[in-house]
Amino acid sequence: MPAGTAVLPLAWPIDLALTVASHGWAQLAPWSWDADAGRLARRERIDGVLGTVSVEQQGPRAVLVGWEGVPGAEALACAARWLSADWPPEAAIAALPEAAALIERGAGRILRCSTFYEDFTKTVLTINTSWSATCRMTAALVVEPGGGAFPTPEAILDYGEQRLRERAKLGFRAATLVAATWQMRGDGAIDRDGDGRAEQLSYDYLIALKGIGPYAAAHCRLLLQDFARIPVDSVVTAHLRERHGCDPAAFAASRAGWGPYLALGYRLMRLRERLG
């Protein structure tokens, strides 16, 4: 299949670099982020064919999407999901006036993978472990069973819990991932490619999955554009204690005015702190 490029117009400004910096996803296989070139790329398997999709900033309201070995329409759809191009920021701007300038500049989007299932799996791989271990486990899944791209739910199930535990070194997360994959597939919450049905993947549904706690459920919802809950981990707890002198519950109570944008407000507050 020939290579190609196309401009993806954006309804609202989106800053690619700030989106990449929103969290650590770009450091996980199969992503590649060239900060000097401003180019985000990854290997994708679409319709059984392995290729590459990339995105570069073209202006505040446009990105250039490139592809090789995969259909252009699917490449554009991948890029749009990575950047949450369908997310309208007007309500968030109204709820977070102190962050309005950042959102209008193109911040506020959190880098997403090509499917919900990949976001879910990578979230599971952050539970009770170090970031270096998350990177290692993710890379192992891309090599095998992914064969160069991130594996589909079917590939994970075919690979099986034992190999996930012993060869990919997922430890206890192997059982969590396999059980959740069977459950979500059986319930129709995800399809065979890993695309999710947001209306079924509620916080209550996710937290009811065996091995999925409040942090993981809130993080997965965040990547479905639900900002009502901060995914609280040790980093968040330490930051709030050291910088704001409070725990997560007290912080949430003090920011009640942010309403359903609590988690987005928190992330943009952290961004403002980093930017000075």
Image: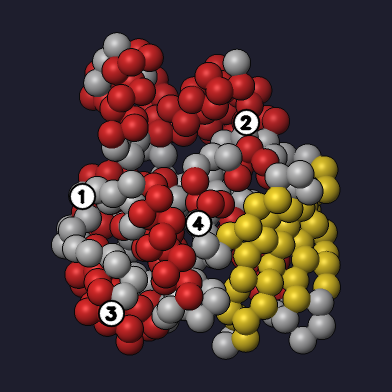
User: Which residue bears the numbered disc 2?
Assistant: 103
In which image quadrant can residue 66 be found?
bottom right
* Distance between the alpha carbons at the discs numbered 2 and 3: 43 Å
State the residue at coordinates (26%, 57%).
206
Give, as a three-letter code, the residue at label 3: Arg
* N-term-proximal mark, 1 vs 4: 4
* Distance between the alpha carbons at the discs numbered 4 and 2: 25 Å
In the rendered view, does 189 fall on the left or right side of 43?
Answer: left
- Please state the horizontal and vertical placement of residue 148, each as a whole percent of the image: 55, 76
Q: Nearer the viewer, mark 4 or mark 2?
A: 4
Secondary structure at badge 1 equals loop
Q: Which of marks 1 and 3 is in front?
A: 3
From where the camera sits, is residue 182 visible? no
Secondary structure at badge 2 equals helix
Q: Which quarter of the rendering shows the C terminus?
A: top right
Q: How crowded is mark 1: few (under 14 residues within 10 Å), some or many (20 or more)?
A: some
Give, as a three-letter code, the residue at label 2: Ile
Give, as a three-letter code, the residue at label 4: Leu
In which image quadrant can residue 261 be found?
top left
Q: Nearer the viewer, mark 2 or mark 3?
A: 3
User: Which residue bears the numbered disc 1?
Assistant: 213
* N-term-proximal mark, 3 vs 4: 4
Secondary structure at badge 3 equals helix
Closer to the camera, 98 or 121? 121
